[in-house]
Structure formats: C-alpha cells, structure tokens
Image (spheres, helix red, strand yellow):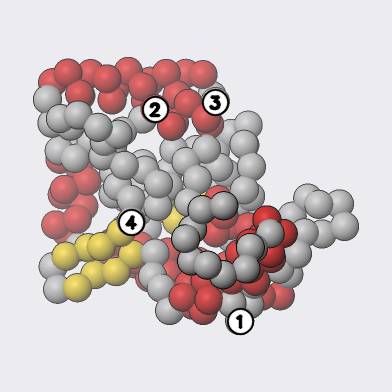
C-alpha cells in the first residue's frame, strides 16, 4: 500500500539493489561524489557540510582511517592554512573514491573495503569527534548562551575522559571559538 502512484509494487530487495547500484562506480551517487567537494572556498567564504571547530579546523584524516568504533583517535595530520586544508580534504575525497572504485566490495574477511575513509569521514564516532561532515554547532536550542557553553564543555570533557568515541555524539561545536575564527581569518 501507499505511494498512490498506481505503479507496480517494488520489493525491499529491489529498493536495496537500486541504492547499492547508486553508490557503485558509475551509479548516480558515485558520479555526484566525483564532482563534489568536502569543503570549498568562494571569495572569502568557506563552505563545509559540518562545523569548522577546534577539533576539525586544519585536521586531515589519514587515508588508512577505518569506519569503526576506534579505541583511540585514528591517524591524521594538521595543516596550517584554510586553502591547504580544503585541498587536502578534497584530495582525500578523490583518493577515497578511487579506492572504492578499485575495491567496491568487502574483502573476504569482511574487514575492509575501498573508500572506507569516506564512510569514516562522515561519522563522529569513527573520527573521534573530528568529522567535518557531521560535527554541528547545535542539536537545538540557543547555541551562544553561557548555559550552552557549559553543556558543550561538559560534553567534551566527558567524551575525552571516557575515551569512548560514541560520547562525541553529545558534543556540539563552539560557534564563537576565537582560535578557529583567527585560523579562518589567516586563511
């Protein structure tokens, strides 16, 4: 039932097959991502899907980053400038897509697959709270109050103290971070 389109029913298996085909090399999502950017600068404006905060600004994950719940932060590096960071993130996207095209399926042990770094990049847990895609300034409410700052600081301290990557889901980024603002202004 439902849908009201009057067409033939579509099975769950057909829906899954269509979604998988979209992300495989040559599929619609794969083609879209080949033309996408993780971050972009137009004039004096930086565009990114998630929050540019003290944890993400200048951070570039290593190509070997896994999509997992890591016991500790995974490898990565810091870069100095916004332009170097944007170039490095977009290079990571290109390499991740090439890796996925070369190894689109899970290996025999179902331990890894091509492009895994891109799955990790969008996940706060896998990135140990450093996801430029999914970190956010708010999950609701006023984000610039002293109360919001206390909640943010307590959540970050808890996540770091527990050494639990899933605890970063409760961490909202600070939109008034002077250090991040200075880094962005330096370019």
User: Under tag 3, what secondary structure?
Assistant: loop
Q: Which residue is mark 1?
A: 26
Q: Which residue is mark 2?
A: 170
Query: Looking at the image, is mark 1 or mark 3 nearer the viewer?
Result: 1
Alpha carbons under labels 1 and 3: distance apart:
37 Å
Give the residue at x 17% y 18%: 147
Q: Reading the chain from its start, which is encountered first: label 1 or label 4?
A: 1
Q: Residues within 10 Å of mark 4 (few under 14, many from 20)?
A: some
> Do residues under tags 1 and 2 come within 8 Å of each other at their CB atoms?
no
Q: Reading the chain from its start, which is encountered first: label 1 or label 2?
A: 1
Give the residue at x 86% y 52%: 109
Q: Which residue is mark 3?
A: 164
Q: Reading the chain from its start, which is encountered first: label 4 or label 2?
A: 4
Q: Reading the chain from its start, which is encountered first: label 2 or label 3?
A: 3
**Whole-percent x and y of residue 95?**
56, 71
Q: Residues within 10 Å of mark 1 (few under 14, many from 20)?
A: few
> Do residues under tags 4 and 2 come within 8 Å of each other at their CB atoms?
no
Q: Residues within 10 Å of mark 2 (few under 14, many from 20)?
A: some
Q: Nearer the viewer, residue 15 or 5?
A: 5
Q: Quadrant of residue 55?
A: top left
Q: Which residue is mark 4?
A: 49
**Whole-percent x and y of residue 174?**
23, 36
The image shows residue 23, relative to residue 109, as above or below, that is: below
Alpha carbons under labels 1 and 4: distance apart:
24 Å
Q: Quadrant of residue 23?
A: bottom right
Give the residue at x 33% y 64%: 39
């Amino acid at each position: 039932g439902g849908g009201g389109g009057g067409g033939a029913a579509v099975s769950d298996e057909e829906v899954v097959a269509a979604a998988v085909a979209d992300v495989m090399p040559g599929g619609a999502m794969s083609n879209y991502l080949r033309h996408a950017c993780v971050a972009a600068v137009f004039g004096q404006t930086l565009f990114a899907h998630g929050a540019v905060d003290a944890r993400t600004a200048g951070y570039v994950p290593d190509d070997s980053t896994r999509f997992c719940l890591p016991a500790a932060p995974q490898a990565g590096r810091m870069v100095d400038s916004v332009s170097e960071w944007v170039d490095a993130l977009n290079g990571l996207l290109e390499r991740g897509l090439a890796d996925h095209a070369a190894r689109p399926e899970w290996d025999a042990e179902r331990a890894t697959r091509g492009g895994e770094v891109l799955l990790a990049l969008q996940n706060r847990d896998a990135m140990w709270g450093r996801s430029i895609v999914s970190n956010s300034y708010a999950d609701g409410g006023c984000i610039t109050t002293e109360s919001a700052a206390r909640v943010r600081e307590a959540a970050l301290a808890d996540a770091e103290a527990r050494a639990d990557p899933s605890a970063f889901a409760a961490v909202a980024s600070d939109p008034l971070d002077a250090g991040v603002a200075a880094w962005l202004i330096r370019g």
